[in-house]
Image (cartoon, helix red, strand yellow):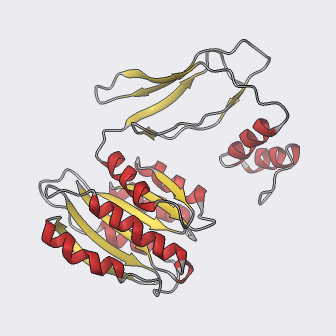
Amino acid sequence: IALKLLVDCSGSMGGDSIASARVALHGALAGLTEHDHVSVSRFGSTVEHVLAPSASTPQTLRRLKPAVDAIDATLGGTEMEAALRAVFALPVPRDCAGADVLLVTDGEIWQAEEMTAAARASGHRVFAIGVGSSPAEGVLRALAEATGGACEFATPGETLEAAAGRMLVRIRQQPWRDARIDWGCEPVWQTTLPTSVFGGDTVIALAGMSASAAAPTVRLLAVGAQRAETEVARGEADAPCPGETLPRIAAARRIATAEESAALELAVAYQLMSKH
C-alpha cells in the first residue's frame, strides 16, 4: 500500500489530543511492511511534510520514530482543505495502484463541502480517526463516505494504536460496495448505510415499519469483488427495547441526513438537542 499519514497539529489539538495522535501514528507505522510506502505530514495554518513518500524500510521507520515523538500542536488554525490538497499532490510510487490517506484530527473543520469535493476528485480514499471530546463526526463521516474510506472516533485515553491498526486492516482489504439491508418487508423509512463496508466492521442500521410484525430475518447485502450481490451478514435476534429510547436514537441518526424541514420536525417531535 501507499499510505499518506496526515496529522492535525493545530492549536485545538493540544494536550491529550496530540498525545493520542502520536500514539495513532506509531500504531499505523507499526503495521507497515517493507513492501509498503509511507509519507507523514502535519498541518494547522500551514502544511509540513515530515517525510516525503518513501519505502517503509526498517531504517526509514526507525528514523521516523523520534520525528513522530516530537510532533506538537503548534501550527495555528485548522486549514484542512489546503492540507488535504497538499497531501493528495504528493507523488504515488509507480508500483502502487493508488494511495490512501490516514487522517488524525479533532475535527474542528470548516469548508466541509469543498474539502469533500476535493477528496472525491483526487482519487484517494480517506480514512479518518477523530480524537478528542467532540470531533466533527458528520464532516469526517461525509469525507470518508465520499472517497470509499472509513472513520473511527476515540476519546483521549482510548487505545488509539489499536484504532490505527484496524484502519490498516481496512486499507488492505477490497471493500464491499453498494451495501443495503433486506428488512424482510418494506420499511416506511430507514437510515442511510455507508457506501463501503469492510470485513470486521459493525454495521448499525435502523428502520421504521408501518405496523408490528413478527421479527423478520434481516440481511446485509453488498457487492463484492466479483460484482455479484452477496449476503454478508444476517441478524435474527429479537431484542425488545421498551420506552422511547430506540426511536429517539433512530431520530437522531435520521436528522443527520434529513432535509432542513424534515430535520426540524424530527427534532421537535422527539425533543432532541440539535442546531434545529
Q: Nearer the viewer, residue 156 or 101?
A: 156
Q: Nearer the viewer, residue 173 or 190?
A: 173
Q: Nearer the viewer, residue 272 or 66?
A: 66
Quick check: can you spot residue 248? yes
Residue 255 relative to residue 41: left or right: right
**Is 182 above or below relative to 34?**
above
Task: Please give the name of the residue rendered at 28% of the width and 46% of the height, measured from the top-left corner.
Answer: 172
Q: Quadrant of residue 122?
A: bottom left
Name the quarter where the C terminus is drawn.
bottom right
Q: Quadrant of residue 132?
A: bottom right
**Is 247 above or below relative to 88?**
above
Measured from the top left, where is residue 139 in percent x and y? Answer: 56, 59
Task: Please give the name of the residue rendered at 27% of the width and 56% of the height, measured from the top-left corner.
Answer: 31
Residue 16 relative to residue 243: left or right: left
Task: Please give the name of the residue rendered at 51% of the width and 77% of the height, measured from the top-left corner.
Answer: 78
Measured from the top left, where is residue 5 in percent x and y? Answer: 33, 66
Q: Nearer the viewer, residue 48 or 79?
A: 48
**Is 147 above or below relative to 190?**
below
Quick check: can you spot residue 258? no
**Is 262 above or below relative to 23?**
above
Number of marks present in the image shown: 0
Measured from the top left, where is residue 213 in percent x and y? Answer: 75, 13
Q: Quadrant of residue 265?
A: top right
Measured from the top left, where is residue 51 in percent x and y? Answer: 24, 76
